[in-house]
Image: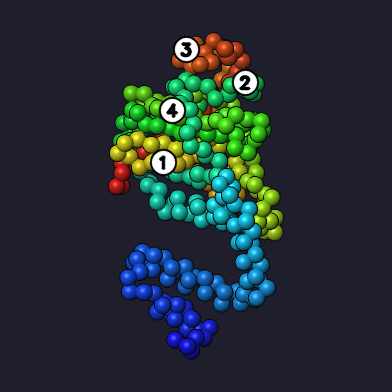
Amino acid sequence: MRHVTKDNITDVFMGYFGSDTDPRLKEILKSLVTHLHAFARETNLTHDEWRKGIEFLEWAGNISDEERHEFVLLSDVLGLSSLVDMLHSSPEGTSSSVLGPFHITGAPPLPIGGDLRKDFTEQVLLAEGRVLDPDGNPIEGAELDIWQTAPNGMYSSQDPDQDTYSFHGIQTTDKDGRYAFTSVKPISYTVPGDGPVGEILRASGRHPWRPSHLHYIVKAPGFRPLVTEIFPDDDPYLDEDTVFGVRDDLVMTYIEKPAGSFPAEGFELSGKVDGPYLLASFDLTLVPKGT
Ligand code: BEZ
Ligand code: FE
């Protein structure tokens, strides 16, 4: 087609696919380009604006490396990551939520009752719960990959002063589906703001804060893996997470437990915690594969 116009260019694009194009790729590209062209028409996009957009994407590419995934962050702050999560989250199970860029593989095993707080001196947080199927039956042998920020709001991969696996651990549930560990209360933190995503947040008058949370990836044979986070209900950013990760069912309440009430056994810190501590109880429900 040589007679390409602003009105027919979308249809012309559709006609350029080869006959053996993967049908799903074709479906996705057709829809993407339809919306992209509609966006340019609707906003009457100028050359300058188009160039700024291209420069923005180039900057995101240049700043990305093995550890920094600026395009994932862009998807997060635009709400795309969360929308994809919600499209595929089963109402029968615990909601999924964003993975984020700070998960690292190979975390060490954390026995039930094990401790992630180590030498930090902040108040102890005891996090516990069960992994269940949709009928409420416990799932034994479920694997929980756990990670969170240190009290300074930084993940180990961001902070040269922390060990590689600081505040990371992998726990396997017992016959009652139970998990339990001690840690410190995570705090609210900001997503990286020194790149193009930070720039777009500032230009949009948006803040970069995420409410504090504990991250879990839960896996068990025969069940869909769950990537999620749990959030305390007293966090000031709960209703304005910059990456849209909060869901009603992921919100929990910290319970203040009085001095002298820390479990006398079953925890690495048993016998070592005299003062008050915080309790976060949260059950996680997995849905069977194929549902
Ligand atoms: C996180 O929770 O670790 C995270 C998620 C999305 C963007 C940045 C951080
Ligand atoms: Fe996080």
Tell me which label, 4 or 3, sits earlier in the chain.
4
3, above or below 288, in the image: below
Residue 226's disc number = 1
Please identify the quarter of the rendering in which residue 129 is found.
top left
Give the CA distance from mark 3 to mark 2: 20 Å
Please identify the quarter of the rendering in which residue 219 is found.
top left
Residue pointed to by mark 3: 265
Give the CA distance from mark 1 to mark 2: 30 Å
Contact check, label 4 and label 1, Cβ < 8 Å: no
Give the CA distance from mark 4 to mark 2: 20 Å
Which of the pair 102/217 is nearer the observer? 102
Please rate how many residues cluster around mark 3, counting C-alpha atoms within 10 Å: few if below 14, some from 14 to 19, many from 20.
Answer: few
* Nearest-to-viewer mark from 3 and 2: 2
Tell me which label, 4 or 2, sits earlier in the chain.
2
Please rate how many residues cluster around mark 1, counting C-alpha atoms within 10 Å: few if below 14, some from 14 to 19, many from 20.
Answer: many
Contact check, label 1 and label 2, Cβ < 8 Å: no
* Amino acid type shown at disc 1: Leu
Please rate how many residues cluster around mark 4, counting C-alpha atoms within 10 Å: few if below 14, some from 14 to 19, many from 20.
Answer: many
Residue 139's disc number = none
Residue pointed to by mark 2: 119
Residue pointed to by mark 4: 171
Q: Residue at x 29, y 47 (%)?
A: 290
Q: Position of residue 110 (x, y in %)?
A: 47, 24
Q: Position of residue 78 (x, y in %)?
A: 56, 56
Q: Secondary structure at mark 4?
A: strand
Contact check, label 1 and label 3, Cβ < 8 Å: no
